[in-house]
Image (spheres, coloured by chain):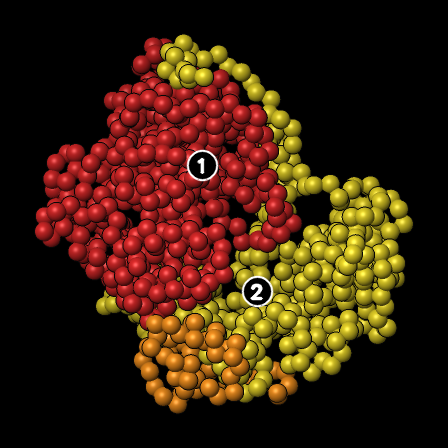
Chain colours: A yellow, B orange, C red
Amino acid sequence: MSAEWFELGQRLHAATSGRLVPRLRHAPLLAGAKPVAVRATEQGGVVRVSAAAPGGQPGSGQGLDGLALLAGLGVSLDEPEPATLVTDDPGTLRTLLGLARTVAVGCAADAVAGHIAWWADRADFPGGGAVADVVAGCRARWISGQAPKAEYGAALWRDRLGVGDASVAGVLDVYAQATAGDPLRFLSDLATDDSFSYDMARKAHCDGWDWRRPDQTSRAACGLRGRCDAADLYAAALLSDPLWRARSVHAGSVVVGRIAVDAPATQRVVPVACARLDARLRAGAEVLWWLGAPGEVPDADYTGTVGAGAVVGGQLVLDVKTPFNRPTLKAGDLVTLMPAPPSVHRQHHGQMVYRKLQYSRRSWLTSGTAPAVRRRSVPLDVLLAGASDD
Amino acid sequence: MRRLGAGLVGHARRLLVGTELSVDDALAVAAGEVSNPGIAASALRDGWAAAEQAGVGGRSK
Amino acid sequence: MRTIPGTGSPIAPSGPVAAPEARVAPAPALCPHPSLATGWTASAIMDDPTTAGVLHSAWSGDSLVAPAPPGSGKTRLVVLLAASLAERAKLRVGIAAQTRDQAVELARRLGALGHPGILAWSTAHPTPALPAPARCGKGVQVRFPSSGGGVIVSTTARWLVSDPSRLACDVMIVDEAWQATYADLGALGAFAGQVVCVGDPGQIDPVVTGQVSRWQGSPTAPNLPAPDALLAAHGEAISVVRLRHTWRLGPQTTALIQPVFYPDLPFTSRRPDEFVKGDDGDRLPEIVAHRVRVAGGPGDPALVGACADLARGLLGRAMVTPEGSRSVAADDLAVVTAHVGQAAAVRALLADLPGVLVGTANQLQGLERAAVVALHPLAGYRDVSGFGTDLGRACVMLSRHRSHLALVVDSASRDVLSGSEPTAAAGAHMRLLEALDMG
């Protein structure tokens, strides 16, 4: 509950020190193998595209020339590897997509348009493998000494990061700093999904599928499932960062406590006396826990399940079911608990099962056709009891 | 207000409504210059301490 | 779109969760297959033209949507409909609940009715006790009878990992359907060619963690509440039956929440008169707002302390109901908060009163108590957030009570709202606070 004040404390420090304060120890975006910085604006119906790739000169073009510029930088479904869209302008992707929609199916620029459509689809997936919003990435990585609203502008981040180049090429410099260092855990898993999705998009393009058509119900449903799984995995990625965990204590999602009684390794259920009452871990929650503080990187962590909670002497005590492979615990040992991360394997399996249901031939709900009603005769008593007066 | 921009001051004021802390108070409490047992004060101190432990990034302004 | 207007005489609800008084037929010894019109366990569905109309529509093969305000007897309708279709129409009926607690309650009511419904349950959770002839089943034990009809209850999540070739139904009833996504409804369609969606359109939207910008503005977006998107996609082929009365909410509460949360579903109160008496022996208003000065954010002890104090203050008060006068007991009370942490803190403060139901709005959806203490969702916030202004959450919190609601409100909330960016939700919250006379 007090996360807002925790962040204010960080922000005040940034303001008085004149330096950015890290919110994360790890990079919130994965450094792409093929980043392309793009800005696109529309005026009077004309779309102007400026773009740059690392080591090259920035270029610009209008309309189809803008798309040709992107193709030259590797933005095309004809390429075996996807390009990562890197941008500091929130309207760029929407503008590019509008331009892509004007491209006729099957024409020379269709592969570029298809790649842009893939960017638009993957923009909902966190981790930056397909689309990297550098401003959002900077906000995730650092706190400035300004009010939060000011952090939505790219200029502040260029200034704080010492990037003097305000052109599209400068976006790559900001990107390089936002992605520097070790990435958050699970970003590589999210990037693997981006790659898989790109391969599917390439195949669909070769098969003549038109991305411009609205999603069928089944495709949209599977897309939502993928997005929710990705969001859950990214939430776990943030919790894998010790700096983020320190903040999360104040949000109640990371719980700090002490072992309430001595617990030998054979004892399955261990009571944990929590430091705060506002723990968000409910009975049945799968947790990851370790001996030590939230900000530490533990030598070993263990799984567990939260059981019943009770208040003893004004303190919340959670019973945690622990595995057999844990060490002996002593009363008073400091322990940190947090939600267990989702299993990537289980997520993929769940998506496969869900997909089978969505594409089942039984379901008129997902086929897009009107339901074929199987009429049944209804007994007279029911008919009379429910008769309407219309 | 020590080197705080108007936007940050406004933001801090909104967050501190009802806490009986002014923005100057919040700064002093966060930096550990005065003690205060309240929930908001404790969270401010934790955030400041986390910032100090994390080191800093970017250039000095 | 075919509609069946809700008409007819009032029917008694099955009663509050705390003291269930379901009107049920005597439980037969064996699964009944009556040939006579009034001889089956769920014949009470015929007592009201609206619920009989739902049965008629579903029996004849319609897929339908039944929007229902709080306390209108949704759960009772789901149970009676399922049992009727199984016993009289000999259909295989699936019920998809949105939470395990709701699934257990549905199965419990089927058993209390005398119907041998099966609750599909996971081995990972303790098996709930159900009144015979209802029972729990796990894994491949869960199947429909080889002949005749039957009812299987499970959570939507559990249905979606089940085998449609083994558990194919004739009808899938989706309980609390406005909490299910259109995406999940599509997956449930793999089990049955006919769906019946019953739920409350004013309450909390389906919980979706992913970004949905791809479908922004689409009336059939996969994240939307299932019935809304279903009607948008197939409106002409879906019947709509509106339940138009609440037997839980009194006239004052109905007048407050109906225009704000249910502008498209007019309903009236048919709750028999009941009230809690104040210290002076006079009846307490249905809703009383209690202003609290907040210094410590949403987790301020002053807020949860006020909730606990108000709950204790209600204990022992005289409560007048159609059955007579008695004292408010612990299991007549609930405390509902917005956050898990707040609920945990209140539970801690009321640890000596385990009968008091304490939970978040999400947890208490579908439940009711005679007297409720609610912690306003914006209490403690100084930045107006989507979570805090979510109207569905506020609707749930304001509609759990029958006799009395003590609403704990942050004295600064109106100022916070007036200083925030104007949104529809913020405006609705402001109107609510004004109506509660927070001047």
Q: Is residue A387 left or right of residue C214?
A: left
Q: Nearer the viewer, residue C320 or C250?
A: C250
Q: Is residue A362 left or right of residue A246?
A: right
Q: In which quarter of the image is the C terminus of chain A?
A: top left
Give percent across and percent down for residue C113. 30, 27
Q: What element carries label 2?
A: helix
Q: Nearer the viewer, residue A333 or B24?
A: B24
Residue at which label 1 appears: C264
Q: In which quarter of the image is the N terminus of chain A?
A: bottom left
Q: What chain is tagged by disc 2? A: A
Tell me, for residue A237, which label it has, or none.
Answer: 2
Give percent across and percent down for residue B12. 45, 76
Give percent across and percent down for residue C17. 27, 40
Q: In this view, does C233 lie above or below A202?
A: above
Name the residue furthest right: A108
Is any atom of residue C193 visible in this view?
A: no
Q: How far apart are marks 1 and 2 (CA)?
A: 42 Å
Name the residue furthest left: C280
The residue at 38%/57% (across/down) is C377
Q: Do the residues labelled 1 and 2 touch (CB within 8 Å)?
A: no
Q: In this view, does A232 lie above or below A17?
A: above
